[in-house]
Image (spheres, coloured by chain):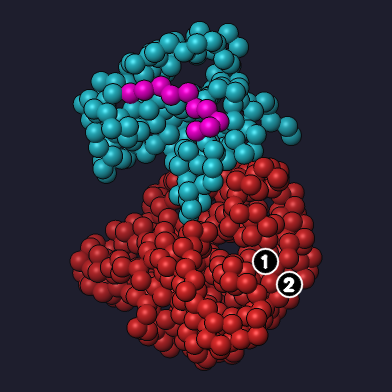
Chain colours: A red, B cyan
Amino acid sequence: MANPSFRIDVHHVTRVEGHGNIVVDVQNGVLKQCDLEIVETPRFFEAMLKGRPYAEASHISSRICGICAVGHATASLRATEKALGVEPSEQTVLLRKLNFHGEILDSHILHVYMLVAPDALGVGSVIPLAKTAPDVVLRALRMKKLAGDLCAVICGRHTHPIAMTVGGFTHFPTTAQLQELRDRLVAVRADVDATVELFQKLKLPAFERDTEFVALHKDDEYCFIDGKLASTDGGEWPVEKYREVTNEYLVPHSTAKRAKNKRQSYMVGALARFNVNYAQLHPKAKEAARALNLTPKCVNPYLNTVAQVVEIAHCVEDSIELAERLMKSGVTWRAPVQPPTLSGEGVGGCEVPRGTLIHNYVIQDGWISGANCVIPTAQNMGNLEDDMRSLVPTILNKSQSEITLDLEMLMRAYDPCISCSAHMLNVRFE
Amino acid sequence: MTSPPPAPTLVLALGNPDRGDDGVGQAVLLDLAERGQLPANVEVLDGGLAGLETCLYLQGRRRALIIDAADMGLSPGEWRSIEVTQPMLAGELRPGVVHSAGLKEALQLAAALDGLPERVTLFGVQPETIDWGSGLSHCVALAVPAVGAAIQERILHDKDGCCDGEDPDYR
């Protein structure tokens, strides 16, 4: 088919929090249209936060996402704490890091095993995968349960943390709980190795497109909480200047904002973190990266999943060290640090599973008067659309179903909220 | 370190007690606890909102009795015991369900993993409300002792924690 003409209309990709469409129109071998339409109804969380007392913000905003609830709560707490001049204790910082790793592990394990592995293994979903490779699915469930249990021990429950509060925690793990977690994390190393081995065997598309990668960065650790914004195109920005990086704008075919920094679009997420922060990865995670043949700067967006596997190795190892540090210092009950002032503005930044998340609050006399949340999936939409526009002309020799699958896999590689629904694409060819 | 094998019979409550009658499973577990000690081959577990990880709770069991709120179009507080069979679990997962899996999806996955207990009985209780808030509605609270008694009777009639012939109608 030398000069094909076809239209792919992936209508209402239902996602957890909304809807999106993929529209591809090719006429006589020329790509006329390639849009990622986000038609999700705006959810107005920022408006919900306005007029609420500052202590409620983390609990309200964690409901933005059931997968990244700890991430939203942490970014929210950091924004509030910076606005009100609160310095959390070292114990609080360590507990938050450990909690955060639990959520990263939970989300990444779900994504790499339940959403991507079936594609790469050529089965439709996790059910046929369970029949042909039950050990793989059981391993995923086992690892996921540990990640959920970790969150429950630290923040009171698996999803939507209840024990995290401004200035500290309201509940603390016992030494016995930390010891059990540490032992289970050590035991799960074998499952991490098996995960790396699995993804060594899986073949992902070889598509490459150079782009800008943005992630939070610290010189002394692989950064998930706080840090500065950094770009592979050069430059660092304090999170307070996030607007200079995100430059959000609207496009007619989407209710989700787009973002651009030094190029037309940029990518956030595991691959961006890997590219920006490779030097700070745990040595065992670097070993995993070598085994997976992943090196920075990697510009194949399909390998975002492989970067997630590397982060699984990192988070397990760092969690073991954090649990040991907490046990060594001894976790003690401490009242949350009280804010010295009740008015101010603050910006909290975190690296949630899907990328850089920003919460920005203005607080007056203890009440939130302004809020802005910049979500990773929104930052990635422009880059994903640019990838699609670059990819489609290179695969016009494929059948329409193969092109649709390549586009679905590309979307899933970004692990957006819509990825879980991408299996139910209602594809129409015209 | 090898974990001991799980108890052959599992009594599993599912649901969120902060969503009104969705907490009926946990209420039944409390009722069971008040009825006295259960046989050693029975484990009682509050699964909360376990999702697909429910599969792990079912692994290695011979029998599972699961209590959950279920919208069956009945009057609030009416309940049914339903034997789960393989044909009920045929087919694919609902699309997009991986991030929000429920009991059916967990049982489907357990079946695919060949990890479904020989016998799975669902005790479904019709809720009046599953809106935010703790505490059961009056009608559902009234059903709790009957469900607890039915589960206790089933457990006590099992000699080895597995199948015990025909089901009586417990309704």
Which chain's residue wears label 1? A
* Residue B135 seen in render: no
Q: Pointer 1: what residue?
A: A306
Residue A371 at x, y percent in the picture: 30, 73
Residue B23 at x, y percent in the picture: 34, 33
Could you tell me what secondary structure mostly forms the magenta stretch? strand
User: Which numbered tag is attached to residue A294?
Assistant: 2
Quarter of image, res A277: bottom right
The local secondary structure at tag 2 comes to loop
Could you tell me if the residues under marks 1 and 2 are in contact, i.e. CB atoms within 8 Å? yes
Specify which label sits upstream in the sequence, 1 or 2. 2
Q: Is residue A330 above or below residue A355?
A: above
Q: Is residue A182 magenta?
A: no
Q: Residues within 10 Å of mark 1 (few under 14, many from 20)?
A: many
The residue that appears at 42% across and 67% down in the rendered structure is A11
What segment is highlighted magenta in the picture? B79-88
